[in-house]
Image (spheres, grey):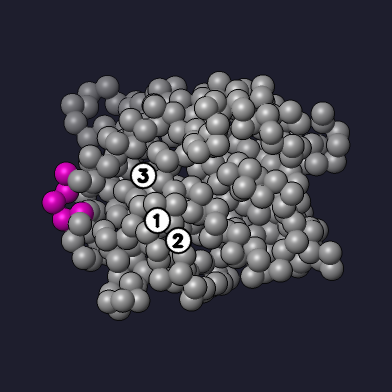
């Protein structure tokens, strides 16, 4: 069941803007042990929520590699999202009305600072394993740099040390789609719905790949001249996201992803930051990922001194980190048990 943490203290963002209060929606599974050190903290990606057992059931749950009988599992909804944490749909205490498009820009580091406050509230002394795929990996890496003694281990999937020019270009195209919807800045929860649908269509092309679409969405009926299977699939995925997400949050969170660069304000090269990271780290890449390709994970492994890299051959592209439960679970299990280097 979703829980809520509220801080009435001002929350300063990296931009210098101050939120008068902070709300964080979160889920926990299992029990914190006496030493308060059996914590696995899972950072979610762009449009997910804090109910990680629902969207990652092959890895989280009784009898799974991330087992609530053994670990205290935490997942917090990220700042700027629309699932209960402070964001466009939460009330501005100064007006009593939702922020909508007036919610300020946030960064990955702002999200991590909110995680830190929640961890303190929960009485956590250290995190045994911080896990993150895609945008979740951005958060896990930043946290490990910001509190190196607090984060003991990392599991990073389909992620990178900085948002690539490719990723920024994709996000810009998605925001252009949202901005083309003249309603997107209106003060209502369904503002920009048509733009969000188009943005999701762009995203789907990067979450999967050519081979996936050809294999699963090719029409067997060669007589068609319209209403193709691939088109129906894209329309369906767009409608599905519109029913559960908010365009203003999507716009904001893609901006936050663009901000990701672990060297910002710290060093002139990514390598100089990565080499300082002392956590034992498992890194996983997916051969068919065109959004955050394996070269980005290999770069992490090359420069993080205590890392192990594994690459899985999946037909699902970037979404493989959400789908390939069996192989990912086995790799993580073996690594945690010391059966892998």
Q: Position of residue 226 (x, y in %)?
A: 19, 31
Q: Nearer the viewer, mark 3 or mark 1?
A: 1
Q: Nearer the viewer, residue 190 or 251?
A: 251
Q: Nearer the viewer, residue 216 or 33?
A: 33
Q: Position of residue 15 (x, y in %)?
A: 39, 52
State the extent of the magenta-drawn residues as a range.
180-184
Q: Is residue 27 above or below residue 278?
A: below
Tell me the SS state at disc 3: helix
Residue shown at 33% from the left, 42% from the top: 200
Is residue 129 shown left or right of residue 288?
A: right
Upstream in sequence: badge 3 or badge 1: 1
- Residue contact at pointers 1 and 2, CB within 8 angstroms: yes
Tell me the SS state at disc 1: loop
Q: Is residue 54 above or below residue 323?
A: below
- Callout 3: few (<14), some (14-19), or many (20+) C-alpha neighbours within 10 Å? some
Q: Nearer the viewer, residue 280 or 9?
A: 9
What is the spatial separation of the Cα atoms under label 1 and label 2, in whole angstroms? 6 Å
Circle 2 is placed at which residue position?
12
Magenta stretch, main secondary structure class:
loop
Residue 16: image tag = 1
Residue 173: image tag = none
Q: Nearer the viewer, mark 3 or mark 2?
A: 2
Circle 3 is placed at which residue position?
255
Q: Quadrant of residue 165?
A: top left
Q: Position of residue 319 (x, y in %)?
A: 50, 37
């Amino acid at each position: 069941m979703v829980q809520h943490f509220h801080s009435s203290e001002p929350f300063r963002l990296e931009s210098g803007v101050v939120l008068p209060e902070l709300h964080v929606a979160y889920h926990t599974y299992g029990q914190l042990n006496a030493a308060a050190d059996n914590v696995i903290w899972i950072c979610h990606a762009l449009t997910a929520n804090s109910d990680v057992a629902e969207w990652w059931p092959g890895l989280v749950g009784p009898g799974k590699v991330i087992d609530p009988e053994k670990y205290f599992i935490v997942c917090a909804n990220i700042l700027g999202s629309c699932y209960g944490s402070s964001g466009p749909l939460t009330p501005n205490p100064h007006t009593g009305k939702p922020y909508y498009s007036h919610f300020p820009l946030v960064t990955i580091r702002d999200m991590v600072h909110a995680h830190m406050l929640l961890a303190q509230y929960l009485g956590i002394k250290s995190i045994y394993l911080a896990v993150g795929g895609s945008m979740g990996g951005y958060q896990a890496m930043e946290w490990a740099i910001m509190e190196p003694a607090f984060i003991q281990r990392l599991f990073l999937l389909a992620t990178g040390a900085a948002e690539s020019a490719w990723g920024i270009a994709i996000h810009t195209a998605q925001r252009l789609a949202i901005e083309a919807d003249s309603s997107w800045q209106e003060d209502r929860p369904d503002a920009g719905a048509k733009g969000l649908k188009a943005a999701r269509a762009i995203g789907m092309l990067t979450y999967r790949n050519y081979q996936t679409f050809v294999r699963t969405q090719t029409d067997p009926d060669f007589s068609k001249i319209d209403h193709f299977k691939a088109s129906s699939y894209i329309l369906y995925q767009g409608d599905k996201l519109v029913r559960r997400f908010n365009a203003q949050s999507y716009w904001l969170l893609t901006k936050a992803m663009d901000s990701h660069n672990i060297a910002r304000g710290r060093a002139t090269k990514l390598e100089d930051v990565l080499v300082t990271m002392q956590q034992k780290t498992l890194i996983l890449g997916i051969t068919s990922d065109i959004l955050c390709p394996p070269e980005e994970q290999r770069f992490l492994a090359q420069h993080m001194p205590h890392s192990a890299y594994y690459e899985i051959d999946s037909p699902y592209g970037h979404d493989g980190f959400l789908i390939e439960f069996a192989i990912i679970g086995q790799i993580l299990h073996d690594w945690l048990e010391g059966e892998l280097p």
